[in-house]
Image (spheres, rainbow, N blue to C red):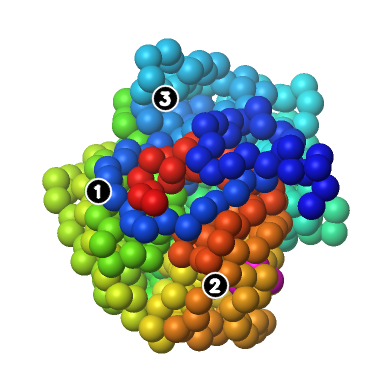
């Protein structure tokens, strides 16, 4: 390691990683003995995106407390501002955003809408700008510019939007206007695509019907109802159909966004590494379409309890407690792979420490996330000395392995940086995470919070 690289390494514990941290940074993670304590998490990323977009096209004022602190949700706020929506961050430590809704007609942006690293922003916002009588150019960073957008281009074009792209990838140029409703069977299970079409459906003439092959997170359906729209849902096999009538007007809401369950996953998996761990997370999102992780953690042996369960704006919220145990193995396949798509990297990162390991199948979508997450997980596990079989649609990771410290590459992917900071807690030696600043995409204070609950 060169002296200049060594000088840029932040020894764990670190104090801050903030959104202004644009430069590549490394963090050293030392092994831990236990995870103990209580933590509150910033608002769920999926819900923050949706609330900000819907507040923008609603009539009246919205107040969104505990808005996600991640860079992705800041990208959504930046885009809606470019579309003429006025919003401001309140002072007072509640991470509240006050939004003055502009109603259904947004303003033509004077420059490109920059989605940064956020696929959710690009795909869902495409549905909204497809309903506007102007042209928008939507761009993203290097990683987002490699991600498939055909999945939204095709149905939005069928609704009447004119879209050009770079061979199905960003940047997108969308000229919207009079949309017509469609009946669309999604080939891939994707909540982002479903949401894009539900949002476009609000601007369409007639009733839009979307069929999903597997049930995906339903935050858009739930949020649309909170903002006053009617959305119908019917289950069909493992999937379902949702319908929305065009021309419905939304009204602003006052809401507190529950803690992010996909961010909690990293801390829950860190706790899972040590039989003596005990962790409490109040005000956590527990929406059933997101909570499959809790069943899996229970299945591999952890003791989990939920108290103070309540429904807030249609979303389940509660206090989660987890106690560590000896970890058993598990297989994730079929509908579970779709339901756990964001949590598979961290489940895979702790799998070698379990007794029987992990097998993941039917998770090809992982290859087109912020990085190719199947390849990234396999490469980093191998660096730590683990045996792992990489497959086209998943991974097989034997259990009963011990890992050693290594230099980890985040592949500029927040979930990979955080997953391997967790794996490092039980490795032998000190693990160096390159590209640790990526964690700021969903949770800028990740390393600081981890440091607070880890016992050494
Ligand atoms: C998300 C849906 C999922 C997920 C992403 C957030 C959402 O993506 O991976 O992190 O908020 O709807 P896909 O819709 O591409 O599966």
Q: Could you tell me which secondary element the residue under label 2 belongs to?
A: loop
CA–CA distance in space, label 3 to label 2: 38 Å
Q: Is residue 404 above or below residue 70?
A: below
C-alpha separation, residue under disc 1 versus residue under disc 3: 21 Å
For mark 1, what is the residue? 280
CA gap between label 2 and label 1 equals 27 Å
Which residue sits at x=39%, y=51%? 456
Q: Which residues are magenta?
A: 377-381
- Left or right: residue 162 versus residue 406 is right
In the rendered structure, which disc, 2 or 1, sits on the residue that comes first in sequence?
A: 1
Mark 3 = which residue? Answer: 95
Q: Residue at x 58, y 34 (%)?
A: 17
The spot of residue 125 in percent (x, y) is 61, 41
Q: Earlier in the sequence, mark 3 or mark 2?
A: 3
Q: Residue furthest top?
A: 91
As rendered, which of 350 and 343 lies closer to the eye? 350
Tell me: residue 70, above or below residue 182.
above
* Disc 1, SS: strand
How many residues crowd around disc 2 within 10 Å: few (fewer than 14), some, or many (20 or more)?
many
Q: Nearer the viewer, mark 3 or mark 2?
A: 2
Above or below, 417 against 139 in this view is below
Horizontal side, residue 111 vs residue 104: left or right = right
Q: Main secondary structure of the magenta part?
A: helix
Mark positioned earlier in the residue sequence (1 or 3) = 3
- Whether 4 is among the magenta residues is no
Give the residue number, with chain letter if any, for mark 2.
Answer: 403
| Secondary structure at numbered mark 3 | loop
* Residue 254 percent location from the top left of the image: 32, 25
Residue 232 visible in the picture: no
User: Can you give x and y, in whole percent of width and height, for residue 321 in the image?
Assistant: 22, 54
Residue 301 position within the rendered picture, expressed as x and y whole percent measured from the top left: 27, 75
């Amino acid at each position: 390691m060169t002296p200049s690289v060594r000088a840029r390494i932040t020894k764990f514990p670190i104090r801050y990683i903030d959104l202004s941290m644009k430069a590549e940074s490394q963090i050293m993670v030392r092994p831990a003995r236990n995870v103990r304590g209580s933590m509150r998490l910033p608002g769920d990323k999926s819900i923050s995106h949706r609330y900000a977009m819907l507040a923008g096209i609603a009539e009246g004022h919205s107040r969104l407390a505990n808005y996600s602190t991640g860079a992705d949700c800041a990208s959504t706020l930046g885009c809606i501002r470019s579309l003429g929506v006025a919003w401001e961050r309140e002072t007072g430590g509640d991470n509240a955003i006050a939004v003055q809704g502009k109603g259904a007609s947004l303003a033509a942006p004077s420059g490109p809408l920059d989605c940064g690293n956020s696929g959710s922003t690009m795909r869902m916002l495409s549905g909204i700008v497809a309903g506007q009588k102007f042209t928008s150019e939507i761009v993203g960073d290097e990683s987002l510019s490699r991600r498939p957008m055909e999945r939204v281009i095709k149905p939005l074009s069928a609704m009447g939007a004119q879209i050009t792209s770079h061979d199905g990838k960003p940047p997108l140029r969308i000229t919207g206007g009079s949309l017509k409703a469609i009946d669309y069977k999604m080939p891939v299970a994707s909540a982002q695509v479903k949401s894009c079409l539900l949002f476009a459906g609000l601007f369409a003439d007639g009733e839009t019907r979307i069929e999903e092959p597997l049930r995906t997170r339903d935050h858009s359906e739930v949020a649309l109802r909170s903002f006053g729209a009617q959305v119908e849902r019917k289950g069909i096999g493992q999937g379902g159909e949702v319908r929305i009538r065009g021309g419905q007007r939304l009204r602003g809401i006052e809401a507190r966004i529950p803690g992010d369950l996909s961010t909690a996953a990293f801390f829950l998996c860190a706790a899972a590494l040590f039989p003596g761990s005990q962790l409490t997370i109040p005000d956590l999102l527990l929406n059933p379409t997101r909570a499959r992780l809790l069943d899996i953690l229970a299945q591999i042996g952890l003791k989990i309890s939920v108290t103070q369960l309540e429904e807030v704006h249609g979303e389940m919220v509660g206090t989660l407690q987890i106690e560590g145990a000896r970890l058993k193995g598990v297989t994730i396949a079929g509908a579970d792979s779709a339901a756990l798509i964001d949590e598979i990297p961290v489940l895979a990162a702790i799998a070698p420490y379990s007794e029987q390991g992990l097998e993941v199948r039917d998770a090809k979508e992982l290859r087109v996330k912020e990085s190719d997450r199947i390849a990234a997980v396999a490469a980093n596990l191998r660096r730590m000395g683990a045996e792992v079989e990489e497959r086209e649609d998943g991974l097989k990771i034997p259990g009963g392995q011990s890992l050693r410290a290594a230099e980890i590459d985040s592949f500029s992917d927040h979930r990979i940086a955080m997953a391997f900071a967790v794996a490092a807690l039980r490795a032998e030696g000190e693990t160096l995470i390159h590209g640790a600043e990526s964690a700021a995409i969903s949770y800028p204070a990740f390393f600081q919070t981890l440091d607070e609950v880890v016992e050494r």
